[in-house]
Amino acid sequence: MYFVEVILPLSLAKTFTYSVSEAEYNYIKIGMRLAVPFGKSKIYTALVIDIHQNKPTLYEAKEIHQILDEKPIVNEIQIAHWQWIASYYMCAIGDVYRCALPSALLLESETIISQKQEGFVEESLLTDDEFLIYQALQQQSSLKVQDIINILNKKNVFPVIQKLMDKNILVLQEEMLETYTPKLIRYVKLHSKYESNEGLSELLEILKNANKQKEIVLTYFQLSATEPVRPFGGKKPITVKKLIESAKSTSTIVKTLIDKEIFEEYYIQVDRVNFSGETKEELLQLSEAQQKAFEEIKQSFIQKEVCLLHGVTASGKTEIYIKLIEEYIKEEKQILYLLPEIALTTQLVGRLRDYFGNKVAVFHSKYSNNERVEVWQQVLEHSSKAQIVIGARSALFLPFSDLGLVIVDEEHEQTFKQVDPSPRYHARDASIVLANSHKAKVLLGSATPSIESYFNAQSGKYGLVEIFARYGNVKMPKIELVDLKDKYFRKQMSGHFSDTLIAEITTALSLGEQVILFQNRRGYSPIIECLTCGHVPQCPQCDVSLTYHKYKNQLRCHYCGYSMAKPTNCHACTSVHLTTKGFGTEQIQQELLELFPNTKIGRMDQDTTRGKFGFERIIDSFKNREIEILVGTQMLAKGLDFDNVSLVGIMNADNMLYHPDFRAFERSYQMMTQVSGRSGRSEKQGKVIIQTYNPEHNTIQQV
């Protein structure tokens, strides 16, 4: 007897055994996906981690449903790495599997409900709900469970379905649907019989009275003439979309020409994410300090697997990364470049593409399922299109076969740690273990390293390379503290802005420079409170206070997304005296519009960057100086490079310092130093204003 050991994408700690035939046993390899039955009727995508002939003792092994892959889509190093994550972070291996694979590769069966063909149904014996389902099945051949939920307007419809099955009216089937579809572009080209001069004369004669069809054919000739000539002769095919747009015509006329066999139609598969192959010709020139750091990193890699690059903000760490990547590209190695925020990939992809052309792939959750499957396939095939992979923490699950270098930029960032759902892994630590499996090197980069990494570097476990000067000898920004206690006492505050900050913003704007304002809380206000009874609206699911978002006039939970309209009176005592406490980015933006009415003000937080290109839109607007003042949350603090920013304002440093977290001081120091680093990144020295009630606090003094 032959068996396979599989992982299921469920929160289950153990693996399961299924029986296979001898032919399947010889065909199946570790890392292939199988469709397997589990439970009463469900079918799941399982992953093979072992092939053996040991019969399970506790249960009868079921047969597999089908083999989904022709070759493995996961390698053995990955499986070993997943098992390490499950063990180290104390979670189920099924959770790691579900997290690692793009959901388009994790097919799951869906229950399809249809009516039994034979037998007579006595409609008078059916209840109202049963009759509604029966009636719906007269209109269409099958229904999904969600369809029945919509028809009955009930959440639990299974008792009704069960009764209809008992009455021998319904039958249930499980159906698996492939969710990944390749992107196909529709092309047309002229039929070969019309390519000669006689053929063209004949064609024009055929279309003599069909002006619209003739126009499309003439447009096709014009477009073909502008396209480069094909090496094996013949006209180059043109996309239907381009042809219709150029001829200002419709797809119906194109279809008529295809039916008449004047055009031939076919489809070509293309990548969803396609970067141009152009690269910069000039070589990257490092400064003296960068070159010294680069040589030290290479020296460190001879003895140590991990090296920490500790360079002040704007010291040019990215150029060193690029130079290092060049070395590994020459050796045909794969490179993984991890970033803490999706926002950072926008600027970085542009810079890397300039040097490496279409060798760069991007992998993160803002990309669609289909796009992520394509990147997965490219990495699996060791394609040159994905030699360098840039991504957020999930990119470390990709199927690398020859990983040479892992770069973890801004390694101190807390966003590398997954909080929910399980597995709650730390991408920095997990990537070091992954690199170790591939005998690859790891470079950790940060201006404010985490205490653990700095300790490991100081104690000799990691290599340590430091840069203390900014690139091009640009001066570090001048930092000024504003005591809010004193300003409120002297009545020198306008809303949440001190007179000092307003004066500095005015000066910067008058010189045509840009300003960044940092407030690490989105929304308008974190709390709405009743002045009569003190009631604060809470989320019914999470038991945390609801944040007020003024632009939608609603209260929203930042944990689960629950929302409700802003109440006009208190839910506890019906009083109309409601007030807001605290302030977020939305409130800062509104106050700025009142203080600087003729200034273009932008906001960058989770609310304004929704959608695939949300980040790009805001970053490009700020880079092109269409926005003069940018208000934002911690997204602004990480590695963004704007040369025209001369002033950074931190609205309230105490919010971070007194956060209930044992790392609060460490995080506050990192955040304030990083935000400060966005200022004065060109010749002119920048300035940072920190507003606080505790200017003597040790952490603020350190900054």
Image (cartoon, grey):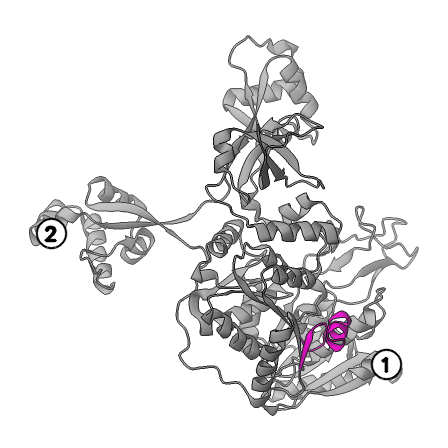
Q: Residue at x 72, y 42 (%)?
A: 13
Label 2 sits on a secondary structure element that is helix
Residue at the left extreme? 198
Question: In the rendered image of this protein, does residue 469 appear above or below residue 132?
Answer: below
Q: Left of 62 or right of it: where is 655?
A: right
Q: Amino acid at mark 1?
A: Asn
Q: Is residue 371 above or below residue 440?
A: above
Q: Nearer the viewer, residue 239 or 475?
A: 475
| Amino acid at the residue labelled 2 | Leu
Vertical arrangement, residue 630 with respect to residue 507, above or below: above
Disc on the earlier residue, 2 or 1: 2
The magenta segment: 446-465
Front residue (pair 649, 281): 281
- Kindly tell me whether residue 643 is visible in this rendering: no
Task: Return the residue at label 2.
Answer: 200
Query: Could you tell me which residue is drawn at 66 percent across and 48 percent down?
Result: 96
Q: Give the mark toward the camera: 2 or 1.
A: 1
Tell me the quadrant of the picture where the C terminus can be found. bottom right
Q: Is residue 455 magenta?
A: yes
Q: Pinpoint residue 181: horizontal percent, then vertical percent.
A: 45, 45
Q: CA distance from mark 2 to mark 1?
A: 84 Å
Q: Residue 585: x and y, percent? A: 71, 68
Question: Which of the 4 quarters of the picture holds residue 520?
Answer: bottom right
